[in-house]
Every structure is written in C-alpha cells, then in structure tokens.
Image (cartoon, rainbow, N blue to C red):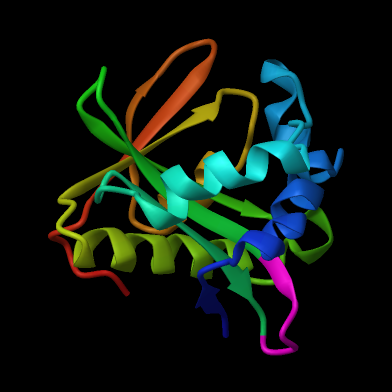
Amino acid sequence: MLTLVTPTLDDLWFRQALMADECTMSYNAKWGGTISFPKDEWESWYDSWIRNPENKRFYRYLMNSDHVYVGEIAYYYDRQRDIYIGDVIILAKYRNQGYGSEGIRQLCIAAKKNGISVLHDDIAADNPSYKLFLKNGFEIEYINNDVVMVKRNLSIPIS
C-alpha cells in the first residue's frame, strides 16, 4: 500500500509543504502549529537526518500507489530521556485512508530492523491520534495534562 522513500535534498519541498499545512499541523497547535522549514535550512537538516544519521535518526517519506507523497515517518534518539521517539505525520487530505496505521507499521519495522527494542511517541494530550497508536500495538506509558506518552515493545511481532 505504501512505499518508503528516502528523499533527496530537492525532495524536501514536500517536508516544507507538510510542515506549513495548517490542517496537517493542527495536532501541533499546543506547540505553535505550523513549523517553518526554509530552504536555507535544508542542507544541514539533510546532513543530520539522511546523510549522517549515526543510527540515531531515521526519516522516510510515505508514497502511495499513485506515486504521491502522503506523509512521513521518523524516529530519533532522545539522549536526555535515553529513548527513541517516533513520529508519523500524514498530510491532512490523505488521513482516514489507512495510511497512518501503515506508517506506524512501517516505522516499527524499520526501527526493529535497526536494532531498536522499544519505540515511544509523545503526543499532545488533546490530540486523539494517540488512539491510532494504541490500535497499532502501542500502550500508554504515562499521561498528564500535556502529553500522552505511548510505547511499543518491538520484540512483539509487528503485524
């Protein structure tokens, strides 16, 4: 259903558009909503996420069967908390078509393949997408007024 694509530097136009889309980034309202990703930042971002991730970062686009980018998946190592944090963002106009679940599945497979045993995501408490993670094998580690922290043990088979 979805293909993982390692973007080229020139492909970062999609990430720029994704981060600037108000509907897509509405989940991020508590932390400022849309995120600026100007072209002059692409090279350094690309170096740390794609060229030299040091097995601490992973980033891919999600492409549908029509060869259209519909979202992104990523994880990174949070040194302060000593955990890997995952991220799945589906462009708003492609939501509710199964891409979120498939993105989570693909992210878990990639993390497991790269030797990660547990994957977390910290989701704004007012964002109902945490339920999608629960539906896809994650469990709530903790919840407070700001965040729902979910985690998935990747030793459990990924379906």
From the image, give the main secondary structure of the stretch colored magenta.
loop
Residue lying at 64% horizontally and 76% vertically, measured from the top left: 63
**Would residue 68 be counted in the magenta stretch?**
yes
Q: Is residue 71 above or below residue 17?
A: below
Tell which residue pokes out farthest to the bottom in this image.
Answer: 65
Which quadrant, please, contains the N terminus?
Answer: bottom right
Q: Is residue 86 above or below residue 71?
A: above
Residue lying at 77% horizontally and 37% vertically, measured from the top left: 38
Left or right: residue 75 compared with residue 36 = left
**Closest to the observer: 151 or 28?**
28
Q: Is residue 25 above or below residue 5?
A: above
Left or right: residue 65 compared with residue 83 = right
Residue 71: % across, % down = 66, 61
Residue lying at 54% horizontally and 42% vertically, measured from the top left: 45
Residue lying at 59% horizontally and 58% vertically, measured from the top left: 72
**Closest to the observer: 13 or 91?**
13
Q: Is residue 44 above or below residue 157?
A: above
What is the total number of numbered labels drawn onto the structure image? 0
Residue 149: % across, % down = 39, 29
Residue 154: % across, % down = 20, 57
Residue 75: % across, % down = 39, 46
Which quadrant, please, contains the C terminus?
Answer: bottom left
Span shown in magenta:
65-70
**Would residue 158 be counted in the magenta stretch?**
no
**Closest to the observer: 72 or 55?**
55
